[in-house]
Image (cartoon, rainbow, N blue to C red):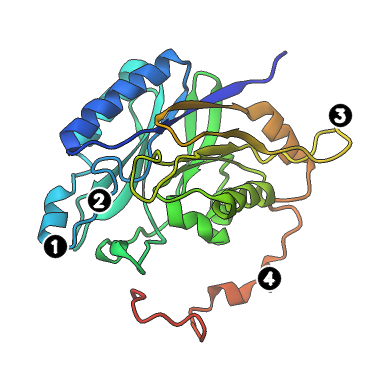
């Protein structure tokens, strides 16, 4: 019996000038992805407004969209219509300040989770956003079977705790909306997170036509060793170029599960009783930053 392959569509798209245009374009590309055989569609970070964060807080609030409003509802309805999962991203209306959010709908149009970025970029314009409170994992029902899915957003990937928490909560696949240059070091972070947690990580970035972005969306499947190979294998099963487009990563979920049952990474040999310092909130030089939100 052949292994099951889950097709993950990375929608590496250039955002338009308005939320209405992004809604229309996003829906169009989800339909195209379905025709290409996608089981899951992933958008870049904050697709509702193309990752634009005005300095004026009132303009920022005006630009944000509610999680139960038309923009999100249309993607929920589309997921049900097409029979595919959609991870839609948005600048979410929230008090006291908007949030950078990703919402996962399954192929029946059910909301599985709403995740807001925990590690906001407070050294930059995201200091004007509220941070999320937790990481979530849900059982996603695809036509190829169930898969346990969670999300990080962009800067979250630079903290090993993000992927580790998702793995400990059961994630097999981590979906990562992104909006920054994906160069060798950030790609190496994703490769490392997949390797050390034995999870697949699918990241969708904006194309090179977006300021401070360069495409290079990717899928790492986390499977380093196979019995039939003398050495290790390349866990990168997809790295896109810079251009706008739909890119499909084919994740062999059965191979990943078999690997997770046998290999030594992940949770099998951890020593959590030794990690107490990880919960210490004290910050000392050289890491003190005056703009860190409390």
Instruction: From the image, tell me which residue sits under label 2.
Output: 52
Instruction: From the image, tell me which residue sits under label 4.
Output: 273
Compute the Cα span from label 2 to label 1.
12 Å
> Looking at the picture, does residue 122 appear above or below residue 166?
below
- Whichever of callouts 1 and 3 sits on the residue coming sooner in the sequence is 1
Instruction: From the image, tell me which residue sits under label 1.
Output: 56
The disc at residue 133 is none
Where residue 17 appears, x then y in whole percent?
19, 39
Neighbour tally class for label 2: few under 14, some 14-19, many 20 plus, Cα within 10 Å: some
Instruction: Residue 49: name its quadrant.
Output: top left
Neighbour tally class for label 3: few under 14, some 14-19, many 20 plus, Cα within 10 Å: few
The answer to whether residue 207 shows anywhere in this view is yes
> Looking at the picture, does residue 89 appear above or below residue 157?
above
- Whichever of callouts 4 and 1 sits on the residue coming sooner in the sequence is 1
Check if mark 3's residue and mark 4's residue have beta carbons within 8 Å: no
Q: Which-is-in-front pick, marks 3 and 4?
A: 3
Q: Residue at x 68, y 52 (%)?
A: 196
Q: Which-is-in-front pick, marks 3 and 2?
A: 2
Q: Residue at x 68, y 48 (%)?
A: 195
Q: Secondary structure at mark 3?
A: loop
Q: Which-is-in-front pick, marks 4 and 1?
A: 1
Compute the Cα span from label 3 to label 4.
36 Å
Instruction: From the image, tell me which residue sits under label 3.
Output: 228
Compute the Cα span from label 4 to label 1.
46 Å
Q: Residue at x 37, y 61 (%)?
A: 120
Check if mark 4's residue and mark 1's residue have beta carbons within 8 Å: no
């Amino acid at each position: 019996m052949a292994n099951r392959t889950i097709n993950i569509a990375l929608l590496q798209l250039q955002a338009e000038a308005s939320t209405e245009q992004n809604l229309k374009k996003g829906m169009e590309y989800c339909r195209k992805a379905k025709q290409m055989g996608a089981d899951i569609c992933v958008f870049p970070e904050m697709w509702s407004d193309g990752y634009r964060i005005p300095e004026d807080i009132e303009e920022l609030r005006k630009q944000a969209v509610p999680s139960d409003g038309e923009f999100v509802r249309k993607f929920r309805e589309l997921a049900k219509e097409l029979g595919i999962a959609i991870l839609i991203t948005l600048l979410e209306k929230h008090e006291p300040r908007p949030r950078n959010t990703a919402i996962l709908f399954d192929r029946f149009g059910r909301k599985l989770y709403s995740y807001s970025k925990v590690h906001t970029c407070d050294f930059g314009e995201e200091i004007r956003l509220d941070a999320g409170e937790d990481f979530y994992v849900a059982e996603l029902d695809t036509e190829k079977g169930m898969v346990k899915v969670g999300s990080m957003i962009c800067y979250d990937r630079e903290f090993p705790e993000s992927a580790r928490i998702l793995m400990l909560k059961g994630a097999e696949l981590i979906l990562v909306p992104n909006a920054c240059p994906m160069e060798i070091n950030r790609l190496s972070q994703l490769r490392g997170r997949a390797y050390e947690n034995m999870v697949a990580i699918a990241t969708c970035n904006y194309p090179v036509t977006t300021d401070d972005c360069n495409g290079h969306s990717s899928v790492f499947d986390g499977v380093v060793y196979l019995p039939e190979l003398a050495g290790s294998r390349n866990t990168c099963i997809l790295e896109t170029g810079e251009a706008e487009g739909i890119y499909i990563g084919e994740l062999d979920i059965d191979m990943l599960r078999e690997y997770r049952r046998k290999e030594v990474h992940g949770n099998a040999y951890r020593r959590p009783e030794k990690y107490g310092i990880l919960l210490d909130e004290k910050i000392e030089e050289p890491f003190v930053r005056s703009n860190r939100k409390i």
